[in-house]
Image (spheres, helix red, strand yellow):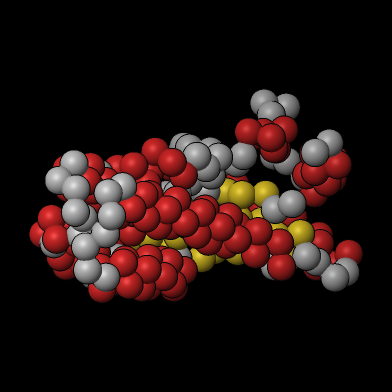
Amino acid sequence: MALLLCLVVTTVALAHGCLHCHSNFSEKFSFYRHHVNLKSWWVGDIPVSGALLTDWSDNTMKELHLAIPAEITWEKLDQVARAVYQRMDRLYQGKMYFPGYFPNELRNIFREQVHLLQNAIIKSHIDCQHHCGIFQYETISCSNCTDSHVVCFGYNCESSEQWKAAVQGLLNYIKWHKQDTGMSLVSPAFRCLESPRLDNPTLENAVECFKQH
């Protein structure tokens, strides 16, 4: 399990929902919304489908249910977006559908999108374990579409020397960040690294802290 030191660089919220940050989102969903009235024999499907498309981004953020920041790499965002657009385009290639079919398909695509986003975000955090020590990767913040990055600590060290260097690097990073910003980036589970008794934590203190979790 990797220790996550999440640093989020944000500004005033501009958008909500990971897919909203993709460069083709506005064009694609504008087309979907404007052509929704041609997809169902039943007039009642039109406002329901329109609402699903209009609220797509906000509902995405509500359904992610992540215990970690909703931040995704550009590469993974592009992969998810392409998968969603492919399914949506295929749905729109059909003519008119029987009552209830079209909004149900939209819900299925929405749920698949949420699942893909969850997996992509979580996998990036898990991949941190394949590194030794402090590691950083660039992301996009799903909450406001600004560039951000995640800093984490990986445990995949092959020798005691690498392990010692990794933990010392973590301690140095924590000290530097607190001095620079006055804020903590350490997961609550590892706040023993920032105990008042450890104003100058040592390598031994850190190792003992990790053994507790």
Instruction: Please provide percent x and percent y for residue 192.
Output: 72, 33
180 relative position to 22: left or right:
right
Quadrant of the image containing the C terminus? top right
123 is higher (above) or lower (below) than 58: below
List the single residue furthest toward the right.
160
Residue 113 visible to the viewer: yes
Residue 141 visible to the viewer: no
Instruction: Please provide percent x and percent y for residue 143.
Output: 33, 47
46 is higher (above) or lower (below) than 157: above
Instruction: Please provide percent x and percent y for residue 112.
Output: 47, 56
Circle count? 0
212 is higher (above) or lower (below) than 57: above
Instruction: Please provide percent x and percent y for residue 136.
Output: 54, 63
Residue 30's quadrant in the figure? bottom left
Q: Nearer the viewer, residue 20 or 106?
A: 106
205 relative position to 48: left or right:
right
